[in-house]
Image: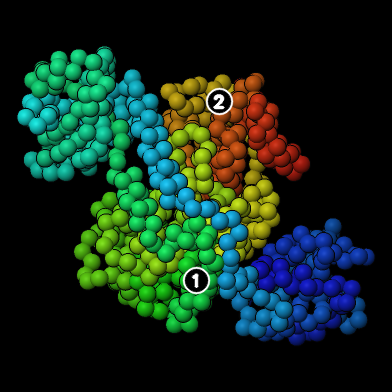
Amino acid sequence: MSLLFDHVIGQFELDEAALYAATGEDLEESGPVVPARPVAEFADDHVSLSHPDEEWTCIPLHGDDSAVPTGSFVAFTDHSIRGPIFVFERDGERDFLDADDFGATRLADRIRFWHSDFVPETYPPTYDSPIDDSEPPRNPTGGALVEDLLEHVERERTATRDENRERTARRSATAIYDEGGDAVPELRPVGADGDGEYRFRVEVPEHLENRRDGDWAYFVESEFGIYEGNEVLVRRADGFDDSPFPIEATVKRIRGLNLWVTVDWADVDGATNVGNELSNGDETYGLTALLNPVPFDRERSAIEELRDHPFQAVLAGERPITFTNGAAARSDPFDDELNQEQQLAVEHALLADDLLCIHGPPGTGKTRTLVEIVRRAVQAGESVLVCADSNQAVDNLLAGASTTDDPDPRSLHAYGQHGDDEFTLDRVNEGQSANDVVSRGYSDVPGRAEVVAATNNSAATLAREFDLLVLDEATQSTCTASCIPLTRAKRIVLAGDHRQLPPYSASEEPPDSNYGHSLFEHLYADGGVYDGVGLQLQTQYRMHRDIAYFPNRQFYDRTLRNGRSIDALPDRPAIEGYNVGGRVETVEHSKANPTEARLVAHVVSELLDDVPADEIGVITPYTAQVARIREVLGDAVASADRITVDTIDSFQGGERTAIVLSLVRSNGDGDVGFLGRPTDGPRRLNVALTRAKRYCAIVADWHTLRYDADGKCTDLYDEFYQFFENTDRLNVVDPEFIPI
């Protein structure tokens, strides 16, 4: 299943074709087994391939070593007695083979090029590239691009500050620190300097006193997440803030355990008394983060640079996008196992003079494709900057599943100085990485690296220009954040999936403009500045076909093909729903459903008979439900500490053999909260459903979800419910009978 097969189906005339007459040689075993059933399943979706008189799907045959159709076909049918079979003629009679047996024959070789994994040397003469050499803009933005970007930065700065203030209200610095937040639990005032700075000394928590052997350099930054330049709130250490506390301040200096702040006195009542108290009082204080201005300042600087950068015209749609670069001609393919769409994406990325967008849905091999682009660009003599919005996403492309002794061949690490030594690879701020391979292997990189990996934000520290920027997970980076690496490169490749979660925003409301969305969406997605500047990887290798069925139809317009057959778990469907009601608790700003947590634990306990604990994932939209499920699992399952339990947002990009999803919301009013928000509710559900390989369970109160009071996502959840009902995969559960 490929762009090529799509093209051939469009050209195929069934009434002019004939059922193939096979010979004995045709039915002999051949080389690699052809995934014939996925080809047939894809063909089955096309009415034009349905035989007028038989219950057949007719699959065109191509030549022995060419993708040019021959005018003959084989037929596929799911026979009521024999099961899935392929039909052909033999000795003047109809004959057939079991679908799996057929895939091993020479005859199956003549449908192999319809599957993306097999790449022909000769294409049909009518087949053409999906991307033109020159693509004009379709939706120019007008002349206010830079000003609009700057305005968005300031809106996000204000929204982030307000969100942090609200999130930490009425909570002590100790509580915030204990939950992993950025806060110093306790400090004592030392005195005031003449220039208006107030000095404090950090009281080291007892459990950390012996950790540093008296060396406190960068301790405050690494342990508490507080840095010079941060806007902070100074508050009573006991958490009982009385007016005018908490007060806003800015961290001016940090030296070991000492830090100096300046106070914004504009909104402080009794400033003189408070100043005296901060200078020499006996009371201890806590300090919580309000805003780190560095990312916003870096975005502003990059946007100002954009005024005179060639990409300003691209982002505004002021000129056409062209594909004439010579990097494709100056390099040779490395990875001969890339499928057709992946190879096409690589070629066009190397041809792009300005940009290419690669839409990579789950399991379609986006990372592998990007690694090939980088390798070939370096071979062509280009320098490459590799970026993503988070350290984790950068390290996924850089190191993947590599260990110190075994480089992951799907990662850049395998081809840098620690692997095949094709190029020198560097990582900016490697110390910020949680990946041991990265933090240990890239602390001392010799010379000027051909490939540099960095977060979008850290790219601001680079004082060089690159020939090519590869921006991974580009749909999770705002336009403004993407401008930082963008201004460091001559041309760019954006890769991501705009049908999954959008960039994080501090504002609860949808962005006022496209600049709160990703650069990928701004340039390429529906309504973007350009049209034909990207392509989609369409063959997924992760999920059982039944798991992929609903997301493919609901979120990807049926464009995904199943690249291989994946077995479900024994004695259970690949995907099933559980319908259960339950009381929902509000925990601070989050939600928990104890009944669903019990049912999740029960489902997990049964899964452990067939799936290792570390191959099970439990995901939910709410942090409070994460905590509740961990608690219940810890009591019910011996191996609970090996089971990943996390929010959907945190699990984007991850995968497990089995996934259990808890949707939490249960009430008589149809109140589904942000699950019904049209801007990201469907995208969050898509993320959740596409993490599983062999099994996916959805635990929910389907009455609540289907009768959303606002009606914004009612159709989505109702169609999902009908999918379970119509396929007999819905389990109705009485909470009284959950055995946990």
Image quadrant in which the N terminus is located: bottom right
Relative placement, left or right, of 737 versus 425 is right
Relative placement, left or right, of 312 versus 454 is right
From what the image shows, is residue 170 above or below residue 44? Answer: above
Element assignment for label 2: helix
Residue closest to the far front: 143
Residue ID for mark 1: 352
Relative placement, left or right, of 328 versus 408 is right
- Sequence-wise first label, 2 or 1: 1
Q: Tell me what residue is drawn at x 53 percent, y 71 percent.
A: 322
CB-based contact (under 8 Å), mark 2 and mark 1:
no
Closer to the camera in the image, 194 or 594? 194
From what the image shows, is residue 67 above or below residue 689? Answer: below
From what the image shows, is residue 265 above or below residue 482? Answer: above
**Which image quadrant for residue 734?**
top right
Residue ID for mark 2: 595
Amino acid type at mark 2: Thr
Q: Is residue 740 visible?
A: no
Q: Is residue 320 visible?
A: yes
User: Where does residue 159 sit, x and y in percent of width and height?
Assistant: 40, 34
Q: Tell me what residue is drawn at x 41 percent, y 38 percent.
A: 155
User: Where does residue 256 sit, x and y in percent of width and height?
Assistant: 11, 40
